Image: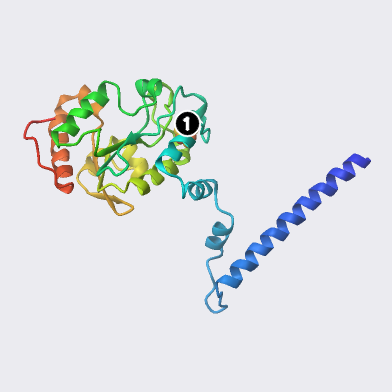
């Protein structure tokens, strides 16, 4: 073994000993803080997860003190998943910080990627007519965002690993805005937000909850533009949403 090999090995051993010492200290600290009784064995896996949080937990933890503006800044430079290298602009979301309604789509499309703003294409303009039908305006009482903040190529659905990498941002946005209701647009967004594989028609009929906030699911505006038969069920969903938010209704249809 050469001198340099020995030096490298010593460094590796030193690093391993330091890490073990630090971990042992953390475990000792945990044991001192929590009275672990022998007749009631603790959940060692849960303790290990607390002591060594996963990547997503670490990210959620690091976002805990971030404001909406700071989250938007972090997102614009984020490369937590491969979509970060493909985007023109990240689309953090926008709207009133104290919005009564939060709208969640699946991800930015071409127009959103080009502008950095959510729901600005044809489907977005159509969606604005849904909002105005229940007396909501982008100006003052809605916050619009997506499951993933960067555009998936060719507008494909976000992959699970992309959605999971990005969800801590949405969770923090929900915690900060504290909307009275969340409207999920389309099956993909709803499946990721509600952690289910249910079909859209099955999800529409239920009021779900995320962080104890009521969540309604309806069709994506782009799907309604392609199939006008969906307009009637969307109007039913919007009426349910208006009732939750105590909003007076425009009797015209979306
Ligand atoms: S999609 Fe989300 S997690 Fe992926 S790079 Fe963009 S901001 Fe980061």
Residue 196: tell me if it is visible. Answer: no
Q: Which residue corresponds to the image point at 44% horizontal and 34% vertical from the top-left?
A: 159
Residue occupied by mark 1? 76
The percent position of residue 147, horizontal first and vertical second, equals: 38, 37
Q: SS at mark 1?
A: helix
Nearest the eye: 81 or 120:
120
Identify the image quadrant of the N terminus.
top right
> Above or below — where is 173 with respect to 107?
below
Left or right? Give the position of 171 relative to 78.
Answer: left
Q: Which residue corresponds to the image point at 6% horizontal and 35% vertical from the top-left?
A: 251
Q: How is the image coloured?
A: rainbow
Quarter of the rendering containing residue 130: top left
Q: Which residue corresponds to the image point at 48% horizontal and 46% vertical from the top-left?
A: 63
The percent position of residue 247, horizontal first and vertical second, equals: 13, 43
Which residue is farthest right? 2
Nearest the eye: 134 or 105:
134
Residue 92: tell me if it is visible. Answer: yes
* Number of numbered discs visible in the structure rendering: 1
Q: Which residue corresponds to the image point at 37% horizontal and 49% vertical from the top-left?
A: 175
Identify the image quadrant of the C terminus.
top left
Which residue is farthest bottom? 39
The percent position of residue 73, horizontal first and vertical second, equals: 47, 35
Crowding at dot 1, Cα within 10 Å, few <14 / some 14-19 / many 20+, comes out as: some
The percent position of residue 20, horizontal first and vertical second, equals: 72, 58
């Amino acid at each position: 073994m050469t001198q340099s090999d020995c030096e490298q090995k010593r460094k590796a051993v030193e690093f391993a000993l330091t890490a073990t010492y630090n971990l042992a200290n953390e475990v000792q600290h945990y044991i001192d803080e929590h009275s672990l009784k022998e007749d009631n064995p603790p959940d060692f896996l849960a303790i290990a997860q607390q002591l060594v949080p996963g990547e997503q937990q670490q990210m959620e933890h690091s976002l805990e003190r971030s404001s909406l503006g700071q989250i938007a800044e972090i997102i614009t430079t984020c490369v937590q998943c491969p979509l970060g290298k493909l985007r023109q602009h990240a689309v953090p979301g926008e709207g009133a910080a104290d919005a009564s309604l939060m709208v969640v789509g699946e991800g930015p499309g071409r127009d959103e990627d080009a502008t950095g703003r959510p729901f600005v294409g044809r489907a977005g303009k159509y969606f604005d007519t849904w909002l105005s039908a229940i007396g909501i305006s982008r100006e003052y009482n809605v916050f619009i965002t997506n499951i993933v903040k960067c555009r998936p190529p060719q507008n494909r659905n976000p992959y699970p690993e992309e959605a999971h990498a990005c969800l801590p941002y949405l969770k923090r946005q929900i915690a900060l805005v504290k909307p009275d209701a969340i409207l999920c647009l389309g099956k993909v967004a709803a499946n990721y937000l509600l952690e289910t594989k249910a079909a859209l028609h099955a999800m529409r009929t239920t009021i779900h909850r995320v962080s104890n906030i009521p969540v309604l699911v309806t069709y994506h505006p782009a799907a309604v533009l392609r199939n006008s038969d969906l307009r009637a069920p969307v109007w039913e969903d919007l009426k349910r949403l208006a009732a939750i938010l105590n909003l007076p209704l425009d009797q015209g249809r979306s």
